[in-house]
Image (cartoon, helix red, strand yellow):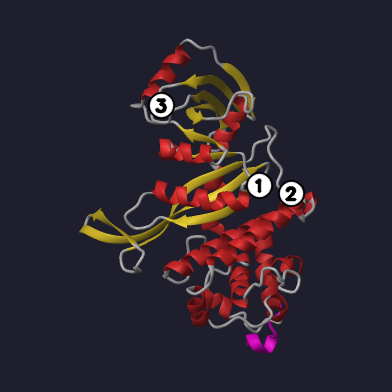
């Protein structure tokens, strides 16, 4: 597999983006899910390193020091180049409704009572032993979501003294230039139901779709009242039966200065409980606010988009933390932490694209993504001479 991935990091094939060997070493560490700089250092005897990175990786301490000096924009450019390759190969297809989403969401990456750095945010945690000062980091991530793919794009650190919205607006502004044609609509959770966010999205020529939860808002109250006098439409999403109310042209959000559209659903899913074998009906309600017109996104498209916001949680953060060491602190220094997060996300994109596009369906049915990731690490370990491992 590493042979097929060398084009991404081979400077001879990509002279317009010279890639330092240290970045390549850290990237392969993330790709192989090694989990620590010390684990990477123990593979230095592998014969594959000179083919993959051009040289043997430095020691763990040296890599940690180098990571604090790396250029984040250089890593972002590599990620953008990989996205362009996928796009040219038509590997990022939109869903049936034709709209690719850019999903924004905040994520707390690490928290500690002892370790801290100059950019740590601080909060007081009430414990049984009394109040304790906790230091933590968080960022806003951007992902592209389409037909059977989740693709991390970039992150922006939430700085001390600011909230998630400030970081999200900076991230949105930076992401739009290189990915302006990559997405059609911006998705976010209920925290982003704020006029400055919607206006920023509209100024970029895109549409927004955000969860509506605040029952105290006039928009929520008016939408619920209109649902009482409006007939819903009914359709199925897999095993789920959906009753949806589509309410365009609502003017109950005066601070935005333009009408918005609200879609509300009542969803019933038949679930067979594993323990008892009984079939139960699980009910849930959802409501979204969007600037998408009905001519561009019918009711079902809005519902599908609204639910696809969870991809950044499920296929992004949850899988990343569980499988790819996304939240692991390799070196507690601000730049090093961002470097490792971006490289972990790039490795996730590459590995998932390889699994989805390069493996035949029969092979995917036999082997999980976790198994393929382990083969990457095994390929490096297998090239270590026996004498060196003794």
Q: Residue at the location (61% across, 44% down)?
A: 145
- Return the residue found at the far left: 130
Q: Which residue is mark 1?
A: 149
Q: Which residue is mark 2?
A: 91
List x then y, in percent, for residue 292.
Answer: 57, 29
Viewer can see residue 202: yes
- Which one is nearer the viewer's eye here, 219 or 195? 195
Q: Which residues are magenta?
A: 383-390
- Return the residue found at the far bottom: 387
Placement of 231 over or under 135, stated as above or below: above
In the rendered structure, which disc, 2 or 1, sits on the residue that comes first in sequence?
2
- Which one is nearer the viewer's eye here, 326 or 273? 326
Q: Secondary structure at mark 3?
A: loop
In the rendered structure, which disc, 1 or 3, sits on the residue that comes first in sequence?
1
Spatial separation of the CA atoms under disc 1 and disc 3: 34 Å
Image quadrant where residue 384 sits: bottom right
- Which one is nearer the viewer's eye here, 82 or 64? 82
Mark 3 surroundings within 10 Å by alpha-carbon count, few (fewer than 14), some (14 through 19), many (20 or more): some
Q: Secondary structure at mark 1?
A: strand
Viewer can see residue 367: no
Q: Which residue is mark 3?
A: 253
Tags 2 and 1 touching, CB below 8 Å: yes
Placement of 318 over or under 386, stated as above or below: above
List x then y, in percent, for residue 125.
Answer: 26, 55
């Amino acid at each position: 597999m590493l042979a097929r991935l060398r084009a991404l990091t081979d400077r001879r094939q990509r002279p317009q983006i010279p890639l330092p060997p240290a970045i390549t070493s850290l990237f392969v560490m993330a790709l192989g899910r090694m989990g620590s700089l010390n684990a990477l250092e123990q593979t230095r005897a592998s014969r594959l390193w000179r083919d993959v990175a051009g040289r043997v990786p430095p020691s763990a301490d040296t890599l940690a020091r180098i990571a604090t000096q790396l250029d984040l924009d250089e890593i972002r450019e590599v990620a953008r180049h990989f996205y362009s390759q996928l796009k040219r190969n038509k590997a990022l297809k939109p869903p049936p409704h034709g709209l690719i989403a850019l999903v924004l969401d905040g994520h707390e990456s690490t928290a500690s009572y002892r370790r801290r750095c100059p950019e740590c945010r601080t909060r007081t945690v009430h414990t049984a032993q009394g109040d304790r000062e906790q230091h933590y980091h968080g960022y806003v991530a951007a992902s592209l979501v389409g037909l059977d793919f989740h693709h991390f794009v970039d992150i922006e650190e939430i700085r001390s003294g600011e909230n998630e919205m400030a970081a999200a607006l900076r991230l949105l502004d930076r992401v739009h230039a290189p990915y302006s044609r990559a997405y059609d609509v911006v998705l976010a959770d209920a925290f982003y139901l704020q006029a400055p966010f919607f206006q920023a999205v509209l100024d970029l020529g895109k549409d927004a779709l955000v969860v509506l939860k605040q029952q105290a808002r006039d928009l929520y109250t008016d939408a619920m009242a209109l649902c009482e006098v409006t007939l819903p439409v009914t359709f199925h999403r897999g095993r789920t039966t959906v009753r949806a109310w589509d309410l365009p042209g609502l003017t109950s959000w005066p601070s935005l200065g333009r009408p918005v559209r609200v879609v509300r659903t009542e969803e019933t899913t038949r679930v067979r409980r594993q323990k008892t074998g009984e079939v139960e009906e699980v009910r849930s309600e959802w409501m979204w606010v969007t600037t998408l017109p009905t001519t561009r996104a019918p009711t079902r498209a809005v519902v599908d988009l609204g639910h696809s916001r969870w991809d950044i949680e499920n296929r992004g953060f949850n899988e990343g933390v569980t499988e790819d060491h996304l939240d692991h602190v390799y070196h507690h220094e601000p730049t090093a932490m961002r470097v490792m997060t971006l490289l972990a996300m790039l490795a996730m994109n590459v590995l998932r694209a390889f699994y989805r596009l390069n493996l035949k369906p029969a092979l995917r049915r036999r082997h999980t993504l976790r198994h393929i990731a382990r083969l990457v690490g095994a390929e490096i370990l297998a090239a270590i001479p026996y004498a060196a491992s003794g």
